[in-house]
């Protein structure tokens, strides 16, 4: 699920209009091997003959609920967010497997950090000082937690931060 979450985070925080396919939030997938219709299967639920109902959390697996909640959190935050809708983007070179970029608009800033490694990385924050601008913390929108921004920040294995600074 880590690759899914990182991909969705990237898609929903870069400039432009993101495109999500229906069922993506439920981890539905299909291939053309069985024909085009297989790619566009109905989402199970809502009809008396459906054996499962993915429209209710009780009808989904734990992993599907995790994916659903993750996308819902990001989309609710993204909706009406001017920094994400109109802000400029600044990329930083990948450092020790961690990709960092910033979105900014009119003094507001969002910092996105994604660790592609299977191990935690202690990221030195001095190389991002031009965007952190002396702030001592940021709010991670994925968890709602305030994250202390000292000299370094521990990014969990395959972890993601989407921080409002």
Image (cartoon, rainbow, N blue to C red):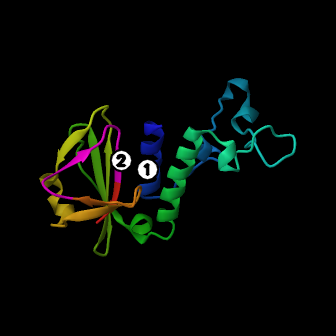
Residue of label 1: 9
* Position of residue 97 measured from the top left corner of the image (x, y, whole percent): 26, 37
What segment carries the magenta color? 149-161
Residue at image mark 2: 160
How crowded pointer 2 is (Cα within 10 Å; few <14, some 14-19, many 20+) is rated as: many
Tell me residue 29's x, y (percent). Answer: 63, 35
| Secondary structure state at the residue bearing disc 1 | helix
Verify CB contact (< 8 Å) between mark 1 and mark 2: yes
Q: Residue at x 47, y 47 (%)?
A: 8
- The residue mark sitting in front, 1 or 2, is 2
In the rendered structure, the answer to whether residue 88 lies left or right of residue 33 reads left
Q: Is residue 109 visible?
A: yes
Q: Residue drawn at (61%, 43%), measured in percent from left and top?
A: 26
Asked whether residue 150 is drawn in magenta, I would say: yes
Q: Is residue 91 above or below residue 27?
A: below
Closer to the camera in the image, 158 or 62: 62
Q: Residue furthest bottom?
A: 106
**Frontmost residue, 61 versus 91:** 61
**Nearer to us in this view, 136 or 82:** 136
Q: Earlier in the sequence, mark 1 or mark 2?
A: 1
Give the distance between the C-alpha atoms of the residues marked 1 and 2, in whole angstroms: 8 Å
Helix, strand, or loop for circle 2? strand
């Amino acid at each position: 699920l880590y690759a899914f979450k990182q991909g969705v985070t990237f898609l929903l925080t870069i400039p432009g209009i993101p495109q999500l396919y229906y069922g993506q939030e439920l981890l539905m997938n299909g291939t053309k091997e069985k024909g085009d219709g297989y790619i566009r299967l109905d989402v199970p639920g809502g009809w008396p003959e459906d054996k499962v109902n993915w429209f209710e959390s009780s009808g989904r697996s734990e992993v599907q609920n995790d994916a659903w909640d993750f996308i819902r959190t990001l989309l609710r935050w993204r909706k009406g967010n001017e920094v994400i809708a109109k802000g400029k983007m600044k990329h930083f070179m990948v450092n020790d497997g961690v990709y960092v970029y910033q979105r900014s608009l009119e003094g507001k800033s969002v910092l996105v950090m994604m660790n592609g490694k299977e191990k935690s990385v202690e990221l030195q924050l001095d190389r991002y000082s031009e965007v952190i601008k002396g702030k001592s913390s940021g709010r991670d929108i994925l968890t709602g937690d305030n994250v202390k921004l000292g000299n370094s920040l521990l990014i969990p294995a395959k972890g993601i931060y989407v921080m409002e600074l």
